[in-house]
Amino acid sequence: MKNKLDKLVIDGTEYVTEVPENSIKPYEGQQDPSEIKAFIPGTIIDIKVSEGDLIEQGTVLLLLDAMKMHNEICSGKRGLIGRIHVSPGDMVQKDQLLMNIIINK
């Protein structure tokens, strides 16, 4: 097993970090592009689309605040907004369904 070594310098002091290679997992994206789910627990800040809107791939759907950072949740496919399951101010859990998209083929 290979480990990744990196150097980190804080206030002039150098630290060496070591991360086991098998502990790094790439983000695989949404498993089902017709279901938009929260990738992290947080609070819905704003919803940028409405039910029935036609959207393109990459359209910003909503803003999710997680750990004091606003994350733009975008569409992975072109389609129509189906049902929106959340409202601004809602607290959501990881993998909670946020909205459905009807995918245009």
Image: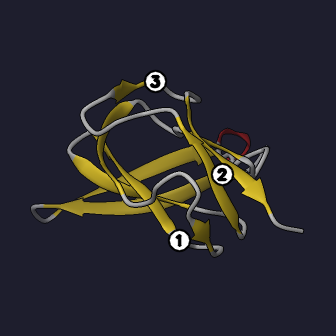
Q: Residue 13 at what x, y percent from top left? A: 18, 59
Q: Quadrant of the C terminus?
A: bottom right
Q: Quadrant of the N terminus?
A: top right
| Left or right side of 32 for 65 | left
Task: Point out the frontmost of discs 3 and 2.
Answer: 3
Tell whether label 1 touches label 2 (CB within 8 Å). Answer: no
Location of residue 97 (image quadrant): top right
| Left or right side of 91 for 34 | right
Task: Point out the frontmost of discs 2 and 1.
Answer: 1
Between disc 2 and disc 1, whose residue precedes? Answer: 2
Count residues near mark 2 (Cα–Cα under 10 Å), then give few for <14, some for 14-19, many for 20+.
few
Q: CA distance from mark 3 to mark 2?
A: 18 Å
Which residue is drawn at the image coordinates 66% and 39% (left, top)? 23
Give the residue number, with chain letter if any, for mark 2: 27
Q: Residue flagged by tag 1: what amino acid is it?
A: Thr
Give the residue number, with chain letter if any, for mark 3: 93
SS class, disc 2? loop
SS class, disc 1? loop
Between disc 1 and disc 3, whose residue precedes? Answer: 1
Give the residue number, with chain letter if any, for mark 1: 59
Between disc 3 and disc 2, whose residue precedes? Answer: 2
Residue situated in front as seen by the camera: 68 or 48: 48
On screen, residue 91 above or below 4: above
Residue situated in front as seen by the camera: 37 or 48: 48
On screen, residue 86 above or below 3: above
Which residue is drawn at the image coordinates 37% and 55% (left, top)? 71
On screen, residue 38 above or below 81: above
Q: CA distance from mark 1 to mark 3?
A: 22 Å
